Every structure is written in structure tokens, then in C-alpha cells.
Image (cartoon, rainbow, N blue to C red):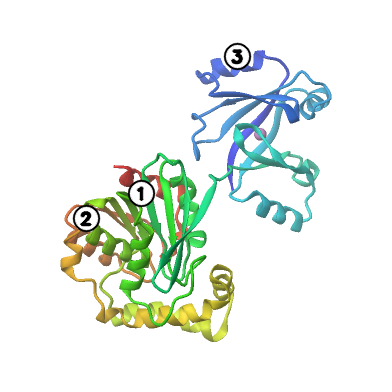
């Protein structure tokens, strides 16, 4: 939850001119919200997503509107604080669980947002607005692969450069990639793939190998003449294999949290938590069931068997050195599974590579500062 803007009730149009002079900038947006009987005047950093908090002047000439009543009783001044949340319905469920009252139901607000207000008597006398930036519409396509199908979640402007996104083992697009996709879909046509056995894709048969997951990714990109590619963890290793195979069709590449040279100790660190979860459940088990459905235990067993075989299934050096795409290799400095030396090694082996170590970041990609990470990686992928 981040502070998006401060709302100020303005008694007269003079306030607009005052703030223009004070801030040395014109409003970047003026918009009338009929349902609230108010004209909103936004000042700030261009209204870019994730920019510094903005100022929202609220002008009204309707005395019976919410802002009109506020002006009549309290005069001009700070009216509300607005916080951006990722999922408004989830945030309101928390509000309800805390026993805080709402002011009405969620509704459309200025700037194309969906908004809701909380009762100021329950929030320290401050009117709190919660807002959500609506998502780009997403279409999930089913792509056939031998023995099943993979789900490919497509979003973003049709004319934007395609970006293919690959999640990690036991993850999914929704679980791991969604926070990044919501930034990337503003500048790319995102094609986010759920590997077989994961998320919305069909089940896996037998013990999978690199070739099975590589086949999933290749099927998902079949209709794309050229594309950018991002992969996390296992998805990063598959991204390397795809880039080596497809050459110039992969225009730019970024991989995060990848290990392509597995030792026995790497395997043990990875499969310990899998076996513990199979044996005794817990919170991770609940999340796996939500993500993959009732087949989650089978998937964990299949991925444990896959991981066991990795020390004998190294990605050959000839494959890595065959990658021609300009590649950003990134890793968290606090990755509990893979030492940074894995990323350094990869960076040295890939002919055209850059290296980025993210300070303090552990392995789960859900821990990244999504906006900063999406911008850094997105800038590389955009070229
Ligand atoms: Co507001």
C-alpha cells in the first residue's frame, strides 16, 4: 500500500492558480467526476505509475456534494489521503475483517481508477481513500503440446513488442509474475506462460526434464516471429535454452535467480522444503493447492524427482555460449538457494551479457520491489 495522493478541498478556483505558482507547474490533468459532483485537478510527477505522491485539488460548486458539505462544515483544507492497493476487493475484505466502516461501495474515480472510502471516524479522523489501477484486459489462450496444453496469459497493447514471461518451478504466472506483468503490460504485449503441471495448464505425465518445459515454451512462442524473453529460476533456465535454440528470434533476454550447474548441495537445499511440505503440509501446501489445484502433491513429487536429476543434466556450455541475444543476468544477494557465483558464472559465459545483483533480495521473486525491478528489467528488454 503506497500513498498515491493527498486530496485538498478548494473553496475557490484561486486555489488552482495558487498551487500552479507555488509548484511552478500546471496541473497534468483536470477531470470532472460527475458521480461525486467534483472537478479534480492533479498536480505532480506527470501522473506516472509509482511516481511521488500527487496533489488532488477538489473543486465543486455543488453544495450538496460530499466535498461541498465538507467545505461548508470545515472550510478548505486537507480532505483525504489516498492509498494505492494492488487488489481493492482484497483490501476491503481486510477493512471489513478489522471492523472498519466504509463510506459506500467501490466506484469509478478520477484517473481511470477504482476507488473506495473508509469512514474517518474509524481511521483516526482522516478520510482514507483506497484506489486500484485497473488491469489491462487479459486473454488466456490454450496452446496444445504433446500430452496436454499450456495456458498462455496475453495482455497489453496489441501493437507493443511481445514479451514472453516464464515463471519458476512450482510457481505460476499468477503467483510469481503478476506483480511484474502489471508494469510490463503497459509497454509490452505480454505472453505469460504457465508450464505444464503448473497454474492453469494441464497436468504433467511422469518425471519431467528440461526438454519438456522447453517444449512448453517453444509451443507458446510458435506464432511469434520475434519476441523479448524473461525467465525466473527454472523459467530462467528454460529461457536460456529457448534463446540458444531460436537465435535472433529472441531479441532481448533477461533471466533472474537461475542456476544451470547444480551440485548435490543445491539439490538438497531445494528439495528439503518440498519433502517437508509433502509430509506435513503447512502454509506453503495451502498456497500450492490454491495455485495448482488438487494435483499439487503429484506436481511437488514430480519436481522433486526432476531436481534430483539436475546434477547429471547440466546445461552444456556450448548451449550457453550459443546465446546471441543481449542478456541481463540478475540475482538476489540473499538468495537462499543459489549463491551469486551462479549468476556471475552465467554472466561470464553468455557472450553479450550484463550482470545485476539486487541487494538483500532472497530467491522468491514475490520479494522484489516490483516497480523498480520491472523498470530495470523492462528497460533492458526494451533495448
Ligand atoms: Co482522491
Q: Are marks 2 and 3 in contact (CB under 8 Å)?
A: no
Left or right: 97 in relation to 207: right
Q: Are marks 1 and 3 in contact (CB under 8 Å)?
A: no
Q: Residue at x 47, y 78 (%)?
A: 300
Can you tell me whether the CB of the residue at mark 1 lies under 8 Å from the nearest atom of ligand 1?
A: no
| Disc 2 to disc 3, C-alpha distance | 56 Å
* Label 2 environment density (alpha carbons within 10 Å; few <14, some 14–19, many ≥20): some
Which quarter of the frame holds ligand 1?
top right
- Residue 145: mark: none
Q: Residue at x 37, y 47 (%)?
A: 162
Q: Secondary structure at mark 2?
A: helix
Q: Earlier in the sequence, mark 1 or mark 3?
A: 3
Position of 177 relative to 78 (above/below):
below
Q: Residue at x 83, y 26 (%)?
A: 73
Where in the figure is residue 57, as x and y percent of width and height?
65, 25
Q: Secondary structure at mark 1?
A: helix
Q: Which residue is mark 2?
A: 247
Q: Residue at x 53, y 24 (%)?
A: 28
Q: Which residue is mark 3?
A: 17
| Disc 2 to disc 1, C-alpha distance | 20 Å
In this view, the mark in front (2 or 3): 2
Q: Earlier in the sequence, mark 2 or mark 1?
A: 2
Where in the figure is residue 252, as x and y percent of width and height?
28, 49
Left or right: 37 in relation to 247: right
Work out whether residue 23 or residue 278 is closer to the camera in this orientation and state it.
Answer: 278
Where in the figure is residue 69, as x and y percent of width and height?
82, 26
Where in the figure is residue 258, as x and y percent of width and height?
32, 65
In this view, the mark in front (2 or 1): 2
Position of 13 relative to 81 (above/below):
above
Amino acid at each position: 500500500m503506497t500513498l498515491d495522493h493527498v486530496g485538498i478541498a478548494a473553496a475557490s478556483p484561486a486555489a488552482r492558480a495558487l498551487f500552479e505558482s507555488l509548484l511552478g507547474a500546471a496541473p497534468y490533468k483536470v477531470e470532472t467526476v460527475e458521480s461525486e459532483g467534483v472537478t479534480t485537478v492533479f498536480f505532480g510527477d506527470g501522473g506516472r505509475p509509482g511516481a511521488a505522491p500527487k496533489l488532488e485539488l477538489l473543486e465543486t460548486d455543488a453544495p450538496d456534494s460530499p466535498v461541498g458539505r465538507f467545505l461548508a462544515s470545515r472550510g478548505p483544507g486537507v480532505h483525504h489521503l489516498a492509498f494505492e492497493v494492488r487488489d481493492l476487493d482484497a483490501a476491503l475484505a481486510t477493512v471489513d475483517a478489522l471492523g472498519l466502516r466504509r463510506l459506500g461501495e467501490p466506484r469509478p474515480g478520477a484517473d481511470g481508477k477504482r476507488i473506495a472510502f473508509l469512514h474517518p471516524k474509524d481511521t483516526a479522523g482522516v478520510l482514507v481513500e483506497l484506489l486500484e489501477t485497473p488491469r489491462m484486459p487479459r486473454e488466456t489462450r490454450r496452446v496444445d503440446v504433446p500430452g496436454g496444453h499450456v495456458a498462455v496469459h496475453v495482455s497489453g497493447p496489441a501493437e507493443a513488442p511481445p514479451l514472453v514471461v516464464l515463471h519458476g518451478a512450482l510457481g505460476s504466472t499468477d503467483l510469481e509474475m503478476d506483480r511484474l506483468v502489471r508494469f510490463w503490460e503497459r509497454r509490452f504485449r505480454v505472453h505469460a506462460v504457465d508450464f505444464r503441471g503448473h497454474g492453469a495448464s494441464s497436468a504433467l505425465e511422469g518425471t519431467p526434464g528440461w526438454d519438456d518445459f522447453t517444449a512448453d515454451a517453444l509451443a507458446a512462442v510458435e506464432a511469434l516471429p520475434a519476441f523479448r524473453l524473461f525467465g525466473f529460476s527454472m523459467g530462467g533456465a528454460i529461457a536460456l535454452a529457448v534463446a540458444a535454440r531460436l537465435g535472433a528470434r529472441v531479441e532481448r533476454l533477461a533471466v533472474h535467480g537461475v542456476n544451470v550447474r547444480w551440485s548435490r548441495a543445491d539439490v538438497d537445499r531445494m528439495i528439503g522444503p518440498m519433502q517437508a511440505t509433502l509430509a506435513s503440509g503447512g502454509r506453503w501446501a495451502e498456497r500450492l493447492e490454491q495455485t495448482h489445484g488438487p494435483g499439487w502433491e503429484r506436481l511437488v513429487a514430480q519436481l522433486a524427482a526432476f531436481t534430483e536429476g539436475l546434477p547429471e543434466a547440466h546445461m552444456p556450455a556450448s548451449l550457453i555460449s550459443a546465446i546471441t541475444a543481449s542478456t541481463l543476468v540478475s540475482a538476489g544477494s540473499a538468495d537462499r538457494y543459489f549463491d551469486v557465483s551462479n549468476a556471475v558464472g552465467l554472466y561470464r559465459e553468455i557472450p553479450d551479457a550484463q550482470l545485476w545483483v539486487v541487494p538483500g533480495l532472497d530467491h522468491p521473486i514475490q520479494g522484489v520491489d516490483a516497480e523498480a525491478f520491472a523498470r530495470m528489467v523492462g528497460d533492458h528488454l526494451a533495448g
